[in-house]
Image: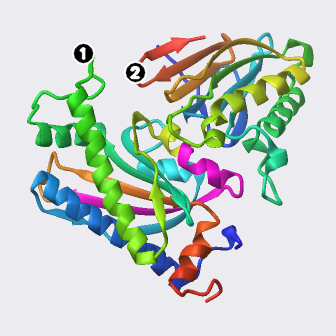
Amino acid sequence: MDFNAGFSIVQMDVLREIGNIGSGNAATSMSKLINKKIDMQVPSVNVVAFDEVMEMIGGPDKLIVALYIRIQGEAPGSVYFILTKEEAEFLVRQITDDTEFKLLDDKAPNDIAISALHEIGNILAGSYLSALSDFTGINMQPSVPSLSVDMAGAILTVGLLELSHVTDYAIVIDTKINDQSDSSGIHGQFLLLPDPESFSKIFSNLGINEHE
Amino acid sequence: MNDTHTVIKVGIADLNIVTAPDTIRTSGLGSCVGAVIYDLPKKIAGLAHIMLPNSTFAKQTQINAYKYADTAIDRLVEQLLDNGARQHALKAKLAGGAQMFQFLSSDTMRIGPRNVEAVQQKLTEHQISIVSLDVGGSCGRTIEFDPDTGKLKIRTVNKGEAVI
């Protein structure tokens, strides 16, 4: 399909609903994990230039903690679960009772904490993807998740590479989840970046005509 | 200190040129390569933020020439020469080409090193020697080049700042 021509209103709604269902499921998992109520925002679907993808996260320089999962199967793509450094630290402290935990500390990294963070990401992204797979009826096989603490630009480029062979724009389905505390809470962000060829598969499986 | 220079920012799959006292910067290089080509006596430099090695495999009808190593280096050299740089004086510095995640499929996985190789090959074609480089590894880099001194500042999350 012509990637740059944009989507119809119905198609945008479908993509938004995909983000909704995935994140809703992930928010429930998160809520169980930290035993707090988790809210989620209405997802946004944006067709953006690569530079703008970085801006959505806070700029290419911004230090982020990201869990990256590559989706294989009929509708390949990339999923990121993104936290700031402080949020990731907060989350690890909640779960491991290690109140001193800091990422990128001079001391040797705490293996248990890193492993916990990895597992949190794994659970959240797993529930995101399984909801997506159930909804679309598309078999999606997640890769082993990978954790990275680095600059947003460097991390997000990985998910843009497949797209970059075909286009200079990415379709980003972006959902934020928040716990209800005001200050040092969790504001996780899910980014779903389907590969170009996946859209027609998603739409046709949901009974949406490409030109509807 | 009365420092009034401007920092010119280069986005992903983009390029630009700069003359002293301004500097040029690109942020968050992962598998992408930041290629700086400069004429030090003339105090002019160009920076390309290259995303992919080769435009001949592009599946687009209208390609963005700044995205690929082969086309971006050509354009960068062209723009530098148009703006007073001299072919024989051109030198290059490179940074980036990291592998951010370990598990990916072989093709995507090697994109960092392949970008570096493609840029090196293209520079050889243009007979531009590489003065220094900081490539590979698994960390993101933000780089800033000063055409006045010829120094390339490289910042990473873990290792702080280095100059090559």
Could you say which disc has been placed on residue B158 in the image?
2
Which is more foreground, mark 1 or mark 2?
A: 1
Could you say which disc has been placed on residue A145 in the image?
none
Instruction: Identify the image quadrant of the C terminus of chain B.
Output: top right
Left or right position of A204 against B51:
left
Q: Residue B46 location in percent, x, y?
A: 74, 28
Looking at the picture, which amino acid does disc 2 mark?
Asn
Looking at the picture, which amino acid does disc 1 mark?
Lys
Rendered residue at 35%/55% (across/down): A125
| Colour mapping | rainbow
Q: Chain of mark 1?
A: A
Q: Helix or strand or loop: what does disc 1 sit on?
A: loop
Q: Is residue A171 above or below residue B96?
A: below
Camera-nearest residue between A72 and A20 = A72
Q: Which residue is mark 1?
A: A107
Q: Residue B92 location in percent, x, y?
A: 75, 18
Rendered residue at 16%/59% (across/down): A31
**CA separation in Å, label 1 and label 2:** 12 Å
Magenta stretch bounds: A157-178
Q: Chain of mark 2?
A: B
- Can residue B11 be seen by looking at this rendering? no
- Can residue B65 be seen by looking at this rendering? yes
